[in-house]
């Protein structure tokens, strides 16, 4: 599976404001690029923090681009949501596109039933928190070859921590959001041991709208404790 993280950050590296309100950082041209990346993907994933903050639908993609690539169907929407906190009326569950919610074994049955009633498929991986390597293996078994991850920072840090990211694209926009508690693309506990810092190779730089798109491949990223 190829895992591609894509997000937009302010010039000072923030995904949104300190009160986690969604900010339009990308311009129209960058959103069109994002729509093409979605169109190339078998699944588009976010963490439940993003669902609760942004209520994204994740259904927007470039159908023409997908057809030109002869990719059948539509991208599946995926939410990493250990305790099944996704509201059953969330936009990510609305419409015809399929949605898979990744949960832990501790997720309460009543919330799982409500999500199933709202049309979600449930994948159980891990105990208290979603075990991302196991969950992604399950998605791969369901023929997800290209997984796009749109954030947020807690989920993306865990994906890096587990050595699961292959590609990172950031749109850096011309605004400053500030705030020591504002989310960044990799939050979580943070890396301390330099041996564990994921190393990136710059593959592309492009001026788009009033910002820059930076594309990296992940050179080395290994799970903590992997020796
Ligand atoms: N500018 C941009 O491109 C984007 C901006 N954003 C912004 O980011 C913010 C949301 O980011 P954030 O709060 O970090 O939320 P995330 O979307 O990263 O979701 C985090 C939650 O995912 C759940 N989760 C399940 N399994 C795991 C795991 N293995 N590792 C980590 N998390 C897991 C956790 O909840 P639980 O324990 O309950 O499972 C966790 O709290 C919002 O402000 C949003 O606007 C978001 C995306 C893109
Ligand atoms: N690429 C990008 N640029 C921005 O400026 C953004 N704020 C985001 N946010 C992400 O897009 C999701 C919204 O998706 P829908 O419009 O509902 O399809 C949001 O949840 C973030 O993941 N992305």
Image: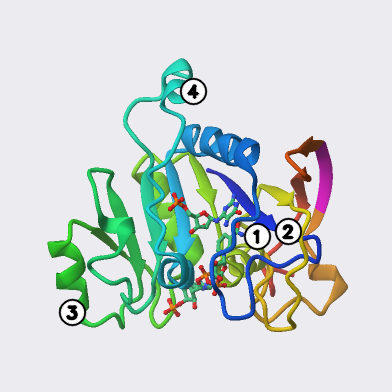
Q: Nearer the viewer, mark 2 or mark 3?
A: 3
Query: Is residue 203 part of the magenta span, yes or no?
Result: yes
Find the magenta span and give its range.
200-205
Residue 145 position within the rendered picture, expressed as x and y whole percent measured from the top left: 47, 38
Asked whether, in this view, residue 65 is left or right of residue 100, the answer is: right
Instruction: Please name the residue that numbered disc 4 is placed on.
Output: 65
Instruction: Please name the residue that numbered disc 2 is placed on.
Output: 221
Residue 164 lies in what quarter of the image? bottom right
- Name the residue rendered at 34%, 44% in the picture: 142
Residue 205 lies in what quarter of the image? top right
Q: CA distance from mark 3 to mark 4?
A: 40 Å
- Name the residue rendered at 41%, 72% in the picture: 52
Whether residue 164 is situated above or below residue 223 in the rendered picture: above
Disc 3, ligand 1: is the CB inside 8 Å? no
Kindly state the secondary structure of the residue where label 4 is placed. Answer: helix
Q: CA distance from mark 4 to mark 2?
A: 31 Å
Disc 1 to disc 2: CB gap under 8 Å:
yes
Q: Residues within 10 Å of mark 1 (few under 14, many from 20)?
A: some
Disc 4 to disc 1: CB gap under 8 Å:
no
Kindly state the secondary structure of the residue where label 2 is placed. Answer: loop
Q: Nearer the viewer, residue 174 or 102?
A: 174
Kindly state the secondary structure of the residue where label 1 is placed. Answer: loop
Instruction: Please name the residue that numbered disc 1 is placed on.
Output: 163
Whether residue 81 is situated above or below residue 97 in the rendered picture: below
Q: Nearer the viewer, residue 211 or 52?
A: 211
Instruction: Please name the residue that numbered disc 3 is placed on.
Output: 109
The mark that comes first in sequence, 4 or 1, is 4
Residue 79 position within the rendered picture, expressed as x and y whole percent measured from the top left: 40, 62
- Name the residue rendered at 63%, 68% in the picture: 16
The mark that comes first in sequence, 1 or 2, is 1
């Amino acid at each position: 599976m190829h895992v591609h993280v894509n997000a937009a950050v302010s010039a000072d590296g923030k995904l949104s404001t300190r009160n986690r309100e969604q900010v339009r950082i990308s311009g129209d041209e960058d959103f069109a690029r994002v729509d093409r990346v979605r169109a190339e993907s078998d699944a588009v994933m976010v963490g439940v923090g993003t669902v609760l903050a942004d209520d994204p639908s994740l259904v927007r993609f470039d159908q023409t681009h997908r057809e030109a690539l002869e990719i059948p169907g539509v991208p599946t929407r995926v939410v990493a949501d250990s305790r099944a906190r996704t509201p059953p009326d969330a936009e990510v569950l609305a419409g015809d596109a399929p949605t898979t919610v990744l949960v832990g074994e501790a997720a309460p049955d009543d919330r799982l039933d409500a999500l199933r009633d709202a049309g979600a498929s449930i994948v159980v991986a891990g105990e208290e928190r979603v075990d991302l390597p196991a969950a992604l293996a399950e998605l791969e078994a369901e023929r997800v070859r290209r997984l796009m991850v749109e954030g947020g920072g807690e989920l993306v840090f865990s994906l890096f921590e587990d050595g699961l990211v292959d590609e990172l694209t950031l749109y850096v926009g011309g605004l400053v959001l500030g705030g020591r508690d504002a989310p960044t693309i990799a939050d979580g506990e943070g890396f301390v041991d330099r041996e564990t810092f994921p190393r990136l190779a710059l593959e592309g730089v492009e001026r788009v709208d009033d910002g820059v798109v930076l594309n990296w491949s992940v050179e080395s990223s290994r799970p903590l404790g992997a020796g």
